[in-house]
Every structure is written in C-alpha cells, then in structure tokens.
C-alpha cells in the first residue's frame, strides 16, 4: 500500500524521514522477524521508495542494528531518573518501590518484550548487535543503580559491601520471573494475570530487607554499614 | 554421509533408536536453528534412514516438541534434590549456597543456554511448546523451592510470608544476570569471566539476609516468624 500523503510538503527533513523509516522498520521486524522482514515492506510502511531506505541505511543488517541500538537511547532518561530519585531520597524503600514499578512497566511493554525476543533470536547471527544492546541498554541502568546504591550506603541508608552485586540482586528479584515468563508464554500473559505494581513493591521490599539498615532493631552497631 | 555402522546388530531396540534420534535432533536443532534443521541431517547424524526418523516422530515440529520437552525430565532429579537437601537442613544458608551453585551450573551449561535461546526464538511460532517447557521445567523447580521454603518457615529457619514469592526472589537473584547476559553476549562469555560459585553464594546470602530469621540480633521477638 502506497503512503496516503499526496499533499505532504515536498521538502521533509532528512532527519524526520530517517526516523520514519526506522519506526516502520521496527514494526516490520517485530511482526516478521529478521528473515521475514524485507526492505520492500519497510519502504511501503514508511511511505518511501526502497531506494530511499537503502540510501538511509545501506542494507538490512545495518537497518536492524540501527533500530535495535536506537532503543537504547531511551536509557538516558531512565539513568537520569535513577540518579535523581535515589540520590536525594530520604525514604529509600518508597523511592525504590516507585522506581521498581517504572522499570518493570517499561520492560514489560509488549513491544519491548518482542524486541528482546528478536534480539535474543538473532544473537547467534549478530553477536555484536545483541552484545551492544545489552551493554548500552541494560548494563547502563545497572551501573547507574550501583552508583546510587553506593551513595545511599555512604549516607548510611543502605548496607552494601558491593553496590554492583546489590544492583544485580535488585533487578534480578524484579525482572527474572515476569520477563522470562513473558519470553516463553507470550508477551501479555504475565501482565494480564499479575499486578505489576505489587510485584515491583515486593521486590523492592525484599531488597530493603536484604540490604537496608536494620531500622526495626535500632541497636548501636547495626545501623552502621561495614 | 551414510552411517558408518555396517556391522551393527540388526535388532537395536526401538527405545534406544528413539533416544538416538532425539539426541541427534538436539545437536542439529541447536546447531542450525529450527528452520535450518532438516530431517535428512538428523537422520544422517543418528545413523538411520529419513523414513525411520519420520516413523518415530511424525514430522519436524513433533520432533522439535519432543526434544524440547524431553529436557524437562531432568527436572525430576533437581526437584527431588531441592526437597531432600532443604527439608532436612539444619544450616539453610550452607545448603542454599550449595543448591544455588548446582542450579546455576545446570542453567549455565552452554547446551542448556542454546536450547533456551532456541525455545525463546520459536515461542511466537510454537507458543504451546515454549509454554510447556517453562511450566514443566522451570516452574516445577520453583514450586519445589516454595514448598521447601514453607517447610523451613514452619521450622522457624526462614521468615517468609509468601513462599512462592520468596522462591521467585531467590531464583531472580541467582539467574537474572548470568542467564540474560549469556542470552545476549554468548554462551561462554559470562561463565568465562565470573566465578559461578561466588555468584551463587552471594545470591544465597542476600536471600538469607532478606528472608532469614535474624540470628545475629537474637532478641526475643525477632526470631519468630510472623
């Protein structure tokens, strides 16, 4: 189907077209998989010629790499949020619960789950794309968390020996079951049968039980981190 | 290449042949993916005719379902081990550390990781196979863990309100980082750069910090579960 935009201004900016092709490509790759996706389909969905798609993205593999890695840009906002929210907190449990819920909602977006499955599926063939996605996306948030946990430990609001491991444990309690269940049983199954806010709160609380200072038993030495 | 077994006894048991075809199929599916695998290749590797493969497994999809689900049989041993090891323990931290290490080693086997990636890749196309794999495999171990955690709570060796959630948090801290990192960055990368025993121990200890009774602060009420 050709694009239905006959009265569109003749001079769309190249940046905008770039974004539109990328957006169309995400839709096609998610719907058809890497092998099923064609540059033709992507061109049709973007309302441009196939030639234009090639001009912007060289070939299918480049386009795939570009759309996968472009999603890691969203991570900047998340990383900023972690630092903001956690570094100035006076109530780590409450703010961690809030952050956990936002994280979980973000990762459980059907589109994000589909992209995740697609990247895992293609990790054998394009290991550098999958590795870059993991490192530039997920691991960046993990480092931001670790930095914030260290800051909270410095303020004696957390008791962590190794903030990187504490960050891993936090995301593990939060994500392992929902995300993996979705990987195997379908994008909507877990979110449809669970209250993500409750799941997030329970992970945040277990984390604070493991790594919080022991406020309930205020004995001199137990409020101090090692 | 024809099978190089001219002097093979004419009467191999059908069960044994079944297992051999299955074993060959696992190798071919893991190496070539679902689409790349052919019944021909599987027959050659198993040293039987293509007709024999079809006689045992009807078609490629059936064979794939069979080999994926056959791996969940290994779960029986693991489930038995969980019950055994945890139900009679007098030292939950030590036994949980031991169990964590065994679990992690099992899931981080390159062959298991490859199968996991293959099942995730095919979850869109064969949702019932992926769902069955998750439920018959992983979720069975999860339920066994929850049952054992409840038994430990009854013996006042753990403080858990909801043993199912505690089990989810335990496996989350243990698996999320290693398994996901392997999904994206390759089967050997994480295991080659991390000491799995240390990772397991740290998860078990964080779990005991979150869910153990507070032995270090032996005040009357803190040793009792809610």
Image: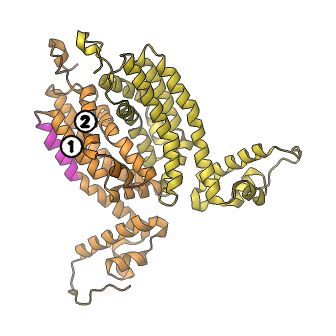
Chain colours: A yellow, B orange
In the rendered image of this protein, does residue B38 appear above or below residue A24?
below
Relative depth, front residue between A45 and A171: A171
Tell me, for residue A52, which label it has, or none: none
Q: Is residue B138 left or right of residue A61?
A: left
Q: Secondary structure at mark 2?
A: helix
Residue at 20% over, 27% down: B158
How far apart are the alpha carbons under marks 2 and 1? 9 Å
Tell me, for residue B204, which label it has, or none: 2
Whether residue A201 appears in this view of the structure is no
In the rendered image of this protein, does residue A140 appear above or below residue A69?
above
Q: Position of residue A152 (x, y in %)?
A: 40, 20
Q: Can residue B80 be found in the magenta stretch?
A: yes
Q: Position of residue A6 (x, y in %)?
A: 88, 48
The residue that mark 1 highlights is: B99
Specify the principal SS of the magenta part: helix
| First along the sequence among labels 2 and 1 | 1
Q: Position of residue B214 (x, y in %)?
A: 20, 21
Locate residue B164: give its quadrant: top left
Label 2 Cα crowd, 10 Å radius (few <14 / some 14-19 / many 20+):
many
Q: Quadrant of the N terminus of chain A?
A: bottom right
Chain assignment, label 1: B
In the rendered image of this protein, does residue B11 appear above or below residue B191?
below
The magenta-colored residue range is B76-89
Label 1 Cα crowd, 10 Å radius (few <14 / some 14-19 / many 20+):
many
Q: CB under 8 Å between callouts 2 and 1?
A: yes
Residue at 28% over, 12% down: A216
Chain assignment, label 2: B
């Amino acid at each position: 189907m050709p694009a239905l935009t006959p009265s569109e201004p003749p001079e769309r900016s190249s940046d905008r077209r770039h974004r539109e092709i990328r957006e169309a490509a995400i839709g096609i790759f998610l719907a058809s998989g890497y092998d099923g996706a064609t540059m033709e389909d992507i061109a049709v969905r973007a309302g441009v010629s196939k030639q234009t798609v090639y001009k912007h993205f060289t070939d299918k593999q480049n386009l795939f790499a570009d759309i996968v890695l472009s999603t890691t840009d969203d991570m900047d906002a998340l990383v900023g949020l972690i630092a903001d929210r956690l570094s100035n907190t006076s109530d780590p449990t409450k703010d961690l619960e809030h952050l956990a819920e936002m994280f979980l909602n973000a990762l459980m977006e059907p589109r994000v789950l589909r992209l995740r499955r697609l990247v895992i599926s293609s990790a054998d063939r394009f290991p550098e794309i999958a590795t870059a996605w993991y490192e530039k996306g997920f691991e960046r948030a993990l480092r931001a968390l670790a930095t914030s946990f260290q800051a909270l430990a410095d303020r004696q609001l957390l008791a962590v020996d190794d903030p990187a491991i504490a960050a891993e444990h936090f995301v593990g309690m939060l994500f392992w079951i929902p995300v993996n269940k979705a990987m195997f049983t379908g994008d909507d199954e877990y979110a449809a049968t669970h209250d993500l806010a409750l799941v997030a709160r329970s992970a945040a609380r277990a984390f604070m039980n493991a790594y919080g200072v022991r406020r309930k038993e205020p004995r001199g030495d137990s409020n101090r981190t090692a």
